[in-house]
Amino acid sequence: MTKLTLLSALLLASTAAAFPAASADLRIGLQDDADVLDPAQSRTFVGRIVYTAMCDKLVDISQEMKIIPQLATEWNWSDDGKTLTMKLREGVKFHDDTSFNAEAVVATIERNMTLPESRRKSELSSVEKVEASGEYEVKFTLKSPDVTLLAQLSDRAGMIVSPKAAEELGANFGSHPVCAGPFKFVERVQQDRIVLEKFQDYWNADEVFLDKVIYLPIPDTTVRLANLRSGDLDIAERISASDAESVKSDPNLTYADVIGPGYMAMYVNVGNGARAENPLGQDKRLRQAFSLAIDREAINQIVFEGTAKAGNQPFPPTSPWFNQNLPVQARDIEKAKELMKEAGHETLDVELQHANNTTQTQMMQVIQSMVAEAGFNVTLKATEFATLLSEQTAGNYQLSRSDWSGRIDPDGNIHQFITCKGGINDVKYCDPDVDKLLNDARASTDDAVRKEKYDAATVILNDDMPIIYLGHQPYAYAIDKGVKGFAPSPDGMIRLVGVKDAD
């Protein structure tokens, strides 16, 4: 090698050391901060977004809202509908290098069913037992047929965690979650960031093109979009409808949206502790009056610029499960005032808590103005989203505004919120007739029978009104042009397998 060649080689080597290959990092702006990062305990929508990258499930959901394989490769039901057998993917590792197998599935499902802090109990309440019927085969034995189980296993109830980490950390698993997804946990700074990095031993690692994913909670949609435009973000989720045209006309950005299967609602504390002891919580006529004073279609136009759907049930009007005999009511101030008077009130003070993000704040201000005409004096209490959910759980609220992202099976939109022992029944509503209808709907494999049960339940709920449904939200995204391969999913999750950041 000549001196010149040697010098050139040294220069190239030093340049490579000084300027290493660029890392493919993706920064995602979230509307809220996630709650505890434990699939057994968590309940937030944004938490599910993080899990989508971190925790593979037994089954997943396709763009067509169909159940597809993930950690389970195939499954079948027994003729009596009481046994579900699943074959599992081989060669899968957890992020702590322990092996995924049937015993790991059994350990996770049993943890979800028995951990005192678990919110998955009602989702798995039909399971009598789960057992390993082979090294890579599990068998679920049910107390009674439950057609919804597969749908439950496509969400947090089916996210399989490392048995070793779960045993070591117990209820503190969320401090360092260990799953089997494409990205592994690195760090979390509350209200600031959640950082994941590519798991090199992921079973489908060849389709993972990002080295690191950083989730940044930014409640203000204007700030999220500004950060995207400045290059501090690559994807901003749930942007404001008022910004859609601006994003579409920006040559540096891409716009995408999809209507989800969930709902927007206000939860009325009817039985959750001392704060339920107030006129709104104890008299359904006042809840009905509050609902009648709201113009849902006007909210859709004012806040969402026509991109949402007005609604009054846990299922969108476009869903086959929607009760057509209970159409979305038009606003009726006079009827609202009559109901108020029947209940012995001309005016009523109400405290309404909501998340401190732009869209919800605007929506609550519109509702505050609407219901004032019927005599409701609403005080708005804006709070950080994880705090809001904590307050709901504790019963420290009178009226609380929250979204539900929705599930592919109707059971996932109603059962756990409204049955007497439902895992997310923050309103503490309890009606044995509703419980029976919803439990019977779970047990039937006949959609016509199930529809009849859900219709009957929605009639009761529309009268009692422990949850005041407002409509059905769109999931809208603004994306940097450098991001390739991203498509919005109808369940609102951000799936990153196949996504590239060319910047």
Image (cartoon, grey):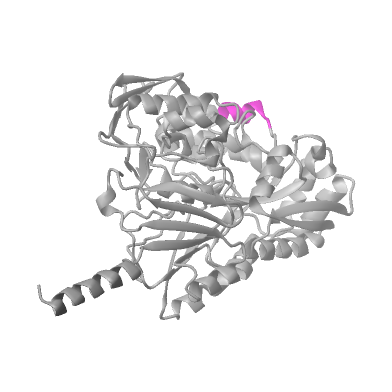
Q: Position of residue 130 (x, y in %)?
A: 40, 21
Q: Position of residue 124 (x, y in %)?
A: 49, 28
Task: Report the front residue among 483 and 432.
Answer: 483
Please tell me in which quadrant of the rendered image residue 383 appears.
bottom right
Determine whether 252 is above or below 102 in the image: below
Q: Going 77% across and 45% down the picture, which residue do you hit? A: 398
Q: Going 62% across and 40% down the picture, which residue do you hit? A: 459
Q: Position of residue 446 (x, y in %)?
A: 40, 31
Task: Report the front residue among 370 and 162.
Answer: 162
Can residue 444 be spotted in the picture?
Answer: no
Does the segment drawn in magenta span residue 433?
yes
Q: Going 81% across and 49% down the picture, which residue do you hit? A: 339
> Which region is colored magenta?
430-437
Task: Report the front residue among 291 and 180.
Answer: 180
Determine whether 176 is above or below 476 in the image: above
Total of numbered circles in the picture?
0
* Quarter of the C terminus within the rendering: bottom left
